[in-house]
Every structure is written in C-alpha cells, then in structure tokens.
Amino acid sequence: MTRRPLLAGNWKLHLGPGAARSLAAAIAAKVGDVAEVDVAVFPTALAVPAVVEALRGSMIGVGLQWASPHAQGAYTGTNSSVLAREVGCSWLLAGHSEVRRDLAEDDARVRSSVLGGLDAGLLPMVCLGESLEERRADRVEDVITRQLAALYDGLPADRAAVLTLAYEPLWAIGTGETATPDQAQAVHALIRGWLADRFPAFVAAETRVLYGGSVKPSNAAELLAQPDIDGALVGGASLDAESFAAIVNAAR
Ligand code: PEP
C-alpha cells in the first residue's frame, strides 16, 4: 500500500497567539488546500485556539505538543488530550526529545500520554531517537527497539495502527546536522521491520514513519525519496511559511 505523506511543523516554544495566527495563515495560503499530502502544525498550547481558527477551512491539522495522560483534575500546570480535542486539535505530539530532556519524560510516561491521546480521539505522533553517544557506541538498534517496545507493549493492532512515529536522532535536532538519507532509511526500515514482526501486516504497512532533524528545503526531497520515510517533522524550518511550504511541496 502507499502511505500518504505527512509533513508536520513543530513550533516549539516560539510564537504567541498573534504571531502563530499569522504564520498559520501564511502557510494555509501556500499549501492549505493540498490534496496529496497531510499537513499538521504544533503551536505552543497557548496559541492553539488562534491557530485552529486561522486554519479553519484548510486541510491543515493542529496538534498539542505535550499532554498529561489525565483528562482533567488536580494536575496543575498540565494540559490534556481531552481539552485539546475540545479546542480543535486533531494531533498529539509525544516523546519529543526536548520534553524527555527538560521535563524528565520517560518511555512509560510517553506511553501513558499516547494512550490518553488515543482515548480522546487524537492522532498521536511519537518521537524516537538516539543520542550522539548512543550512535557512536553502536547502540541505535537497542535504543530504538527499547522505545518501540515500551510504546507498543500490549497495544492491540487496531490501536497500534493509529500511531505515527517520528524518527528524530537527537544529534540532528536544531543542530543543522541532518542524518544522511541512507542513515535515516536504515533506522526507518528497522522500525518497520520491528512492527512487521509483532503485528499483523497492515500495521507495518500503514504506519507512517516521519524523519525529523534539521529538515530544510535543500535536503527534504532526498530524505522523502527513501522508501520507508513517509514525511517529516520539521522544527526550525517550519517557522518560515516559504520554507515549510517548500518542504510540503517536496513531498507532493
Ligand atoms: C523538531 O523540533 O522536532 C526538529 C526536528 O527540529 P529541527 O527541524 O529544527 O531540527
């Protein structure tokens, strides 16, 4: 089967509601009606309602960058998938390495956040990836399979098939250094093989595995041309409408 490419912009802790609304409108003007690929953006939580409004009527989805597994209650300082859905999100980012690093998110918490997202009807996009030290120590396969095992343990195939994965080597995020197409393809093939060994064939066939790590207009096409790379999660370059639109167009 052919997987529909998915291009996502992670706006991190950039852009308040006004600036996020403007960027969303500029992106929508360029690629808001593309039919051949899916597009999503992840603004800061405070800018989500403004971005949802700016993108109404376009094909571009909006997501939350992090969610507690709890729907609501005495969990001060957090956000939930249920409330994200209420304000118009369709996506949930989970396991981003900056959250793992800064908020001590571990594999178990990533999994519970993902389960909460699934329960709320969001589409989770889960980040995986190794550090430079782990790559140098030849531990890429160990790290990726550990993250996959923690995420998918006991998940029935119909729920597993809803997840999107994003392979994001930590050494390539925000550094300007990108995995080569061969390096990325090797890990994407490993991920698809892991899914194929554990689930009925449709899960590996349907799961989109995005690449993330310094994707820009100049390197997007060769990464996206790899057979197991189904799109990109884009940080820095997604903050510029022209660059992000160029990356979306590279996938068409
Ligand atoms: C990201 O934040 O997920 C990311 C890949 O960032 P960048 O494209 O800036 O490396």
Image: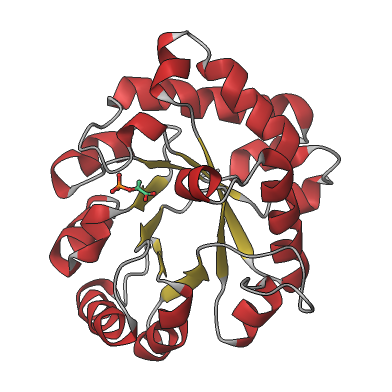
Q: Which of 176/234 is in front?
A: 176
- Quadrant location, the N terminus: top right
Residue for point 44% across, 20% down: 186
Q: Which of 3/189 is in front?
A: 189
Residue for point 40% across, 26% down: 185
Q: Is residue 115 visible?
A: yes
Q: Quadrant of residue 75?
A: bottom right
Residue for point 64% across, 36% down: 204
Residue 120 image point, x, y percent: 73, 72
Q: Quadrant of residue 151?
A: top right
Left or right: residue 218 compared with residue 75: left
Height in image: 4 above or below 53?
above
Residue 234 image point, x, y percent: 32, 52
- Quadrant location, the C terminus: bottom left
Q: Outermost residue toward the top?
A: 137
Residue 250 image point, x, y percent: 23, 51
Q: How many marks?
A: 0
Q: Is residue 225 visible?
A: no
Q: Which of 205/170 is in front?
A: 170
Q: Quadrant of residue 28?
A: bottom left
> How has the structure been colored for display?
secondary structure
Residue for point 78% across, 67% down: 119
Left or right: residue 134 compared with residue 183: right
Residue 218 image point, x, y percent: 13, 42
